[in-house]
Image (cartoon, rainbow, N blue to C red):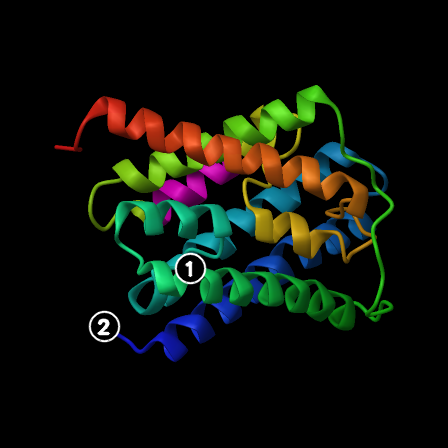
Amino acid sequence: MPSLARRLLAELLGTALLLAVVVGSGIMAERLSGGNMAIALLANTLATVGGLYVLIEVFGPVSGAHFNPAVSAVMALRGTLAPAALAPYIAAQLVGAMLGAWLAHAMFDMAILQFSIKVRAGAGQWIAEAVATAGLLLVILRAPAGRASAMVAAYIGAAYWFTASTSFANPAAAFGRMFSDSFAGIAPLSVPGFILAQLVGASIGLLIHRSLGPPP
């Protein structure tokens, strides 16, 4: 197993690149879509699906490619991540998410330091985040060996469209996206509600997984 330092580096880099993909493709899509929000969301979705698949394949053998505090927390509960590594994993993911948003800004000649003003709140948004995160954990926990990267990417792509929140499903993503006043941003005041809903969703996903029994 790689050392903890290498695993943390993989989580930081992977989460940073994931946020750069999400934020950067959102900026590009918004600039090129001519105000057509459906086209912008479709472009953002396709870039995220492709980027997520590649990042899981690249970093999975090193750190497990969590890129997500909710996933790391569930893995710690299941014993596949050492409890002592949980806090460092989450710290690396949060720092990586912020750096990824800043990297996207730098690539598009935008102000590096900014905060989103896009309010995302309300019962529908929170329910959507709980559903999105529950489904994500269920896919991760029950994916056949060697197929998790494709299944996770496909699920997130679908959840972009069937959830009202466009499926953040990731506390680190919510944290990082509040640093970008762009298509993918979320206002800081909306972040706590999203994170709470995501943690509830992760718990639901784990409960469903346990109720279904071990995968074949």
Magenta region, main secondary structure: helix
Disc 2 target residue: 1
Is 21 rendered above or below residue 203? below
Q: Is residue 107 left or right of residue 35?
A: left
For badge 1, the amino acid type reads Leu
> Which picture quadrant has residue 62?
bottom left
Residue 153 shown in magenta: yes
Q: Residue at x 72, y 47 (%)?
A: 184
Which numbered tag is attached to residue 78? none
- The secondary structure type at the circle numbered 1 is helix
> Which picture quadrant has residue 39?
top right
* In front: label 1 or label 2: 1
Q: In this orientation, which residue lies closer to the viewer: 56 or 9?
A: 9
Disc 1 target residue: 86
Whichever of callouts 1 and 2 sits on the residue coming sooner in the sequence is: 2
Q: Is residue 121 left or right of residue 146?
A: right
Of the 4 image quadrants, the one containing the N terminus is: bottom left
Provide the residue span drawn in magenta. Answer: 149-157
**In the rendered image, is residue 209 in sight?**
yes
Q: Residue at x 64, y 27 (%)?
A: 126
Of the 4 image quadrants, the one containing the C terminus is: top left
For badge 2, the amino acid type reads Met
- The secondary structure type at the circle numbered 2 is loop
Q: In this orientation, which residue lies closer to the viewer: 74 or 156?
A: 74
Give residue 49's position: percent from left, percent from top. Answer: 50, 47
Q: Residue at x 49, y 31 (%)?
A: 201
Q: Residue at x 62, y 61 (%)?
A: 97
Label 1: few (<14), some or many (≥20) within 10 Å?
Answer: some
Give the CA distance from mark 1 to mark 2: 16 Å
